Image (cartoon, rainbow, N blue to C red):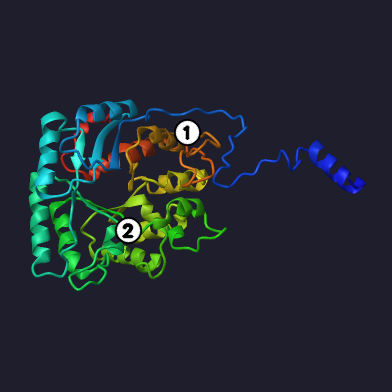
Amino acid sequence: MPFRLVSVLLFLFITGLHPLIAQEMSFEEYNPKSTLVVPGQEVLKARYPFIDIHSHHFRMATHDLGELVKAMDTLNLSIMVNLSGGSGQNLKDIMTNVNANYPNRFIIFANVDFDGVGTTGWADKAVKQLEEDYNSGARGLKIYKSLGLRYKDSEGNRVAVDDPRLDPVWAKCGELGIPVLIHSADPKSFWDPMDDKNERWLELKTRPRRKRSDTDPVSWEQIIKEQHNVFRKHPGTNFINAHMGWFANNLGRLSELMEEFPNMYVGIGAIIAELGRQPRNARSFFIRYQDRILFGKDAWNPSEFPTYFRVLETADEYFPYYKKYHAFWSMYGLDLPDEVLRKVYYKNALSLLKDADTSLFPEK
């Protein structure tokens, strides 16, 4: 063996880079445990009782609510808002189960079926059904992202979020005094090129159906613009913009929208990773708009709530997030003032939700 090659192999072996022992690893596999030693610990229970404005339980009509309430109690979750109430008989069945067992622990939102847009009398029927659902106990309306992404009208055309044929629905919510929690589009990264510059590359690789384009069905900017048009056109209706309207990574722009739309509130479901990587900026935003930010988690997984509590309540540094494909970075605490926490955890939600049991909370 030539002397030069022997020298190179000896160097690689001494430095730990010998090709025979080097470990090949993909980005998907690489998930190092931090060696940083700093003060801080998990927060397993929220400092104050809270309302989860964004949860989904599709079988609540038959679900054993006792087990669910036990899990809620471990988190200090006083009222859960189930956004998946459906309408008609399904919603009535849910209310029967809730009212017979835990009438003060759950609030149910109705849903609208947009499949019939464009048929004769669709708006009148939708508004009538919404009124019936309200009389059955629904205290809000949840709009899924399928509006703007998937729904087609009777002519086969995409139903835009700001389609004027939907205006009677938004107006009826204002008349009834119930909020509309609306999810439009998805993170903008889903529309961006799937390359080495995309922060959501791993998520798109593992969940390729989430990838979008300007023609599938339209651009991200178009859908977001349509949503904002609805807020602008219906100032008498309160809208809760799910996932901070996908502007949690651009709080400067979100601040402009908060100023433009005083009827827009924002929920923090599924975007805590964006807030936890910009603690000073996010803290300033929360303090400035403390009356219009709502706690929400989205998918029901009790083990994930502590990350939310820790980001909101503590000044801890560099602690892990729970889903690498959402965020491969670490979190920092916002250390929010107590009064801001109370508003985010329950006061702001109480101001929007009719019939919520205020006795569950220390300050109204």
Q: Residue at x 44, y 49 (%)?
A: 285
Give whichever of 287, 219 is nearer the camera. 219
Q: Position of residue 132 (x, y in %)?
A: 7, 51
Question: Badge 2 local density, few (<14 within 10 Å), some, or many (20+)?
Answer: many
Q: Residue at x 35, y 63 (%)?
A: 224
- Secondary structure category for the residue under label 2: loop
Q: CA distance from mark 2 to mark 1?
A: 31 Å
Residue 137 visible within the image: no
Task: Judge depth for marks 2 and 1 and give the one in front.
Answer: 2
Give whichever of 171, 208 is nearer the camera. 208
Q: Quadrant of residue 147?
A: bottom left
- Secondary structure category for the residue under label 1: loop
Quadrant the C terminus occupies: top left
Residue 128 position (above or below residue 18): below
Mark earlier in primary sequence (2, 1):
2
Q: Which residue is mark 2?
A: 184
Q: Which residue is mark 1?
A: 314
Q: Residue at x 24, y 66 (%)?
A: 233
